[in-house]
Image (spheres, rainbow, N blue to C red):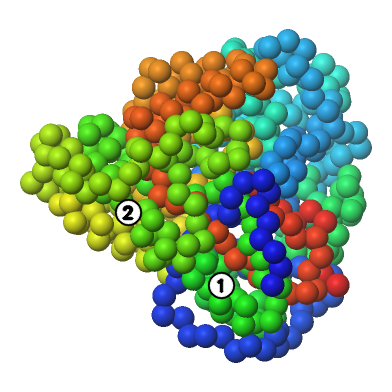
Amino acid sequence: MRRRTFLGLVPVAGLAAVAGCAPLPSSGPASQGPPGVFRYAYELTPSRLDPHRASISQDGVTLFPAYDRLVHQSPVGEPEPGLARAWTWEDPLALRLDLRPGVTFHDGTPFDAAAVRTNIERAKTVQGSAVRTELDPITSVEVRDPLTAVLRLSYPSASLPAVLSDRAGVMVSPKALADGLDLDAVAVGAGMYRMVEHRRGQITRFERHPGYWDPAAAAAEKVEIHHIADAATRLNAVRTGVVDACRVPPALLDQAKQTGLEVSTAGSLNFNYFVLNRARSAFGDLRVRRALNHALDREAIRQGVYRGLATVSAQPFVPGYWAYDPDLGDEAIRFDPDLARRLLAEAGVGGGLRFSTVIPTGSDYQPLAEAIQAQLAAVGVTMEISPAAPDTMGDLMFVQERYDAMLASWGPRADPSMTVATRYTANGFGNPGGQTTPRLEELHKQALATTDPGARTAVMHDLVDEVVDQVLEIPVVFPEDVVVQSPRVVGLVPRLMHRPEFRGVTVR
């Protein structure tokens, strides 16, 4: 078994434990896949293939092989050159992008500054955009010359280079957009692989793009992403040689070891949490939100559901990450059911609070949901559990606002201001109901306007303190995942952002 990798932080995000799985045989893979084809089992199906309207950050796992971004991310989440080979702040309201020459989209269309303008304008205005909030500072894109684009801002945004390393920085062929192609049916990007097949909920296949600007990144001739929601099924797929790698929750650690394959754990910023629609149910009352925090016995969840392979934090970040405030402590999430009952009574719902929670289908989240349901019931709160297909969760909670709460995992962002903008601001896509606080909005503006690292850290600590004090969400745990892979796999490394990328990954 390989050593755990923490990337300077804490464990990778996991999914809840899987109960009742029979032990796996100790034999290795029954077969090997075709040469040059890397096959990965991923727990999620993308919500949609349109990169600007895909509703969850984890969709990038399936989208990024085909869609290159202006900025890339290192394994520890630092911005790196992508389609923009360099970027420079000309002033606080002007970010110049120096673009990579000789790049073409999969349909032969040249990539240039005009393509950048077309994509950013589209991402800001297309109906159902999931990245509109992240691109809000940009008022226009100046095409200075074919390889120079200048993003003009209405207010400072120190996080913008990091923003462009996620879905907001994806570049789609302008010709495909002009032709009105259905981007939920076909992917036309400039990435290292062309998407040649997508069967929703089953498999996405890619073939190497021969004209890609970084040939070493497309190390495998072909890539397959097998969308398998059930963790035990993913593990068995690696054991039997159907796929080459996957990740599973801590409950399957022993079974993973029995496969005889390479097993490791790694760290990320991903965590399991409650999204509350603070405009629904009684969640607009701070006392109710604080009561839920104190009703949860996170240590019992950590031990019982995750076998101790998880970290508890009151903050949306973890110790070791620069946005984490080491002076804050965890008093806000101290397990105190008596205090929870008093707060509920003060809020006028001591006679019983009932709310609906949507969770992903499959075995990964059910044990966590049931543990939380039981702990809330002990203080007189009834949590109704409604499973839904993982790829529909974002639409159900953030677009339709059909549920009071959602229990899911948060796909981290390359900059903490992106998390704040998406989850806590009034217009944030991931903030159903739009409830926020004036102090948070002001601190968010300060964090965006501050470029000095020390000063920005201090502002971000104040902002995190406001999130915790006002219970703008309820973090549960930062669980670990177990990564299982065939010894054939080369180049698959853990990533702070919890989204596996397949740059440089191949099989022997």
Q: Position of residue 360 (x, y in %)?
A: 42, 59
**In the rendered structure, which amino acid carries the disc numbered 2?**
Asp
Q: Return the residue nearer the eye: 329 or 455.
A: 329
Residue 98 is drawn in which quadrant? top right
Residue 249 position in % (x across, y down): 52, 66
Closer to the eye: label 2 or 1: 2
Left or right: where does residue 358 sit relative to residue 491? left
Which of disc 1 and disc 2 is earlier in sequence?
A: 1
Q: Mark on residue 297?
A: 2
Quadrant containing the N terminus in the rendered view: bottom right
- Closest to the observer, 48 or 390: 390
- Asked which quadrant contains residue 454, the reply is top right
Q: Are marks 2 and 1 in contact (CB under 8 Å)?
A: no
Query: What number of labels is visible?
Result: 2
Q: Residue at x 51, y 26 (%)?
A: 461
Residue 63 visible in image? no
Q: Element under label 1?
A: helix
What x and y, as percent, mark residue 132?
54, 30
Residue 290 badge: none
Q: Which residue is mark 1?
A: 253
Density class for disc 1 (Cα within 10 Å; few <14, some 14-19, many ≥20) is some
Kind of element beneath mark 2: loop
Is 258 displayed left or right of 222 in the figure? left
Residue 131 shows in this picture: yes
The residue at 88%/47% (across/down) is: 214
Residue 502 position in % (x across, y down)? 75, 56
| Residue drawn at (76%, 78%) of the image | 33
Residue at the image position 41 percent from the left and 75 percent from the top: 19
Q: Amino acid type of disc 1?
A: Leu
In the picture, which quadrant includes the C terminus? bottom right
